[in-house]
Amino acid sequence: MLRRMLREGLRARARKRLASRDARELAELKRALPGFEGIETAARAARSELAASWHAYVTTVSSPMMAASLELSALILAIARIFRPRRILDLGSGFTSYVLRGYAREAGSVAVVTADDDSAWLERSRVFLAASGLSTDDMWIWDELSKSSPQPFQLVVHDLGGKLSVRAGTLPRALELTARDGLLVLDDLHSKLYRDAAPGICRRAGRRLLSARTLSLDAYERYAAIALPR
């Protein structure tokens, strides 16, 4: 009985510390990014809009655990609507491609480039986008895009590779492709390997990495962070 009470007390304190840290990090994001004060409201609205399409996607094309979460997808759409990027890089095709290309159609005059390291999955995403009535232009194999010299992107969503070691290994190049004043959103910071590696990679690229855990935490404890200019 005493041991159980001690364990419950420790868990309660851990939850309290985590909640306090999340609140600090969200406040820091809001201070750092003009227009971010309304991000929670914008993300809730985006989640409501995307919910039906996301559920269809994870039952007919992918699965909830493999696909970008509804929370991440809503955050990405909210960020795009707040910051209005004209060039977007979508690394790791799938539901994020649907979200970003849907935003491009909504906003007009927005270029979206998609890249994946898996040619079969890239083609599967192409079919899904076409069936959804969205553009399938500028869809690349990652190695080809990485070796090219595209203009920088104001918003980069980095969700490339099934293995997080691949994600970490390609993060430096993804940061190089991000405009000086642009934002890069990276998912899966629940992984200790990635969580330990990503801040240093961003720092060496002249960026700081801020957690967006409260805005993107999903049922599998995955969450995102945002790399922004120092």
Image: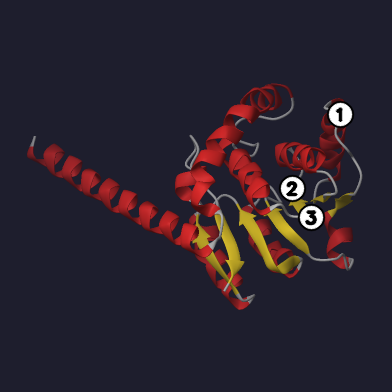
The crowding category of the residue bearing disc 2, from other C-alpha atoms within 10 Å (few below 14, some 14 to 19, many at least 20), is many
Is residue 222 visible in this depiction of the protein?
no
Q: Secondary structure at mark 1?
A: loop
Q: Is residue 204 above or below residue 42?
A: below
Check residue 86 in the rendering and tell me which mark sits there, or answer none.
3
Q: Residues under labels 1 and 2: Cα distance?
A: 20 Å
Q: Name the residue located 49 percent from the left edge and 51 percent from the top edge.
A: 37
Among numbered discs 3 and 2, the one appearing first in the sequence: 3
Relative to residue 4, is residue 218 drawn left or right?
A: right
User: Which of pointers 1 and 3 lies earlier in the amino acid sequence?
Assistant: 3
Residue 75 quadrant: top right
Q: Nearer the viewer, mark 1 or mark 3?
A: 3
* Residue at (19% x, 43% y) in the render: 7
Label drawn at residue 92: 2
Q: Of the residues shown, which amino acid type is indicated by label 2?
A: Gly
Residue located 50% across and 38% down the image: 218
Q: Amino acid at mark 3?
A: Arg
Is 149 on the left or on the right of 52, as rendered? right
